[in-house]
Amino acid sequence: MAKIIGRKEELQELQRLYESDRPEFVAVYGRRRVGKTFLVREMFRDSMTFYHTGLSVYDDGSKVSTEEQLRHFYHSLQMHDSDADHAPKSWIEAMYMLEELLIKLDNGSRQVVFIDELPWLDTPRSHFITALEAFWNGWGAGRDNLMLIVCGSAASWMIKNLINNTGGLYNRLTCEIKLSPFNLCETEEYLRSRQITASRYEIAMAYMAFGGIPYYLSYFQKGLSMAQNIDLLFFDRKAKLRMEFKRLFTSLYKYPEKYERVINVLSTRHYGYTREELAKILNTPLGGSFSEILNALAASDFIMAYKPIDAKKGETLFKLVDPFCRFYMYFADKALEGDSQYWLHNVNSPNVASWSGIAFEELCIMHTEQIKRKLGIAAVRTSESPYTLRGDEHHDGIQCDLVIERGDRVVNLCEMKFSQGKYEITKSYDMTLRHRINAIMSRLKSTQSLQLTFITTFGVKHNMYSGIVQSEVTLDDLFV
């Protein structure tokens, strides 16, 4: 088995399920390219009884037919020594053939059946879900040595049709595992495993561009700087990830342009939009289909829904959180200009500095647990969100990167700064900070206190204004 980076909890759970003495029906889902297939295949490489993966869309975006999916399934049956002598005409027949194969191969030991990219099999009018219900309810659920693992990148499909199924598969899953991107620590471990040497500053820069997506990281080349790798993967004329944004949504959704438009709008405002604001900008009705789009994007970790602290009753904001999507939206036009070394030529430019400030804030929010650990409040009940106080005719508005409201009646106002050295607080910025502190303090309960926390790459430079900072978190603290 190849070395699996991170995924300790997931590996322990899969091992527990494998060793159980009952039938197991496991759903693994998560963002495309996050490493779901690799995890399952490597975990069960030596004990896989049957493996099949659905066919994706064609390069031109057209869908694969049910007949083609069935022929491909028949090929997988043959590869595993099935006695079937023809391709199935329906998914019901295909599942009968799978049952016959498993009976033939059954020697009493655990049988692991892995069906990858399950949502792709559910083509229009294919009745795939009905066939899967019949396979599990009528046969699989009675086989104590069967472990059925299904996997899919269309997380919303997995949630709707398996996890929250209200029909024949209601409450049939015995376990669901959502695979998330690597954190910074896991990203560093992965790059080291590939003998790629980089400083934590460089790793953070790469993370801010591509996120903790193993598939993207696998293209990094040793011997190149992170700036060179970013050029190679995105700005080079043959860059492997230049068209990735389009592929992401084409492979997941029936009408990908609708999802891309939401991402495009959310990329224009760091703290996000309400559902009503989004619908107005997109000129789309506030209905079920729009909610499905938002839910699908959130399920795959492209966006997040959050309730701001001190929000109006029922107010929810949606914001873009996928690093690669933000990076694409910010630099796609630059990639088309033809400078294959754009990043090397502009790494210290105002344009990159503007992006990196926002991207670092997102990186920090994705590592809130590490921040809490550094602050010594890992066990304290908290709620976290960006904080926006709209201005009016009497007061200027304020926007804070992150506010942590704690169960011990302390509020951490977190400022995040990405810089190449220690961050220096100037006189004007000190005045801005005091304005923010006073504005938030005026809205706290009398029993609450406020602490200013700075999250920076290399710490805060000591000067006459640095005393306002009560706690610090540095980049190293996020790699824990």
Image (cartoon, rainbow, N blue to C red):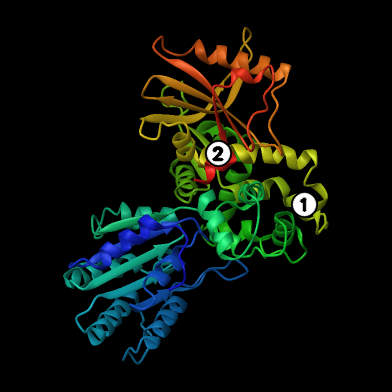
Question: Horizontal and vertical percent for residue 408?
Answer: 37, 22
- Residue 312 in view (yes/no): no
Q: Quadrant of residue 244?
A: bottom right
Disc on res. 71: none
Q: Which SS class for mark 2?
A: helix
- Residue 343 is labelled as 1
Direction from residue 363 to residue 383 in the image, left or right: left
Label 2, on which residue? 364
Q: Position of residue 166 (x, y in %)?
A: 27, 53
The amino acid type, in three-letter code, at marker 1 is Trp
Q: Residue 162 falls in which quadrant of the image?
A: bottom left
Residue at 27%, 68% in the rendered image: 18
N-term mark: 1 or 2: 1
Q: Nearer the viewer, residue 324 or 70?
A: 324
Q: Which residue is drawn at the image coordinates 58% and 61% (left, top)?
A: 192
Quadrant placement of the N terminus: bottom left
The image position of residue 297, as x and y in percent, is 50, 48
Q: Residue at x 47, y 78 (%)?
A: 68
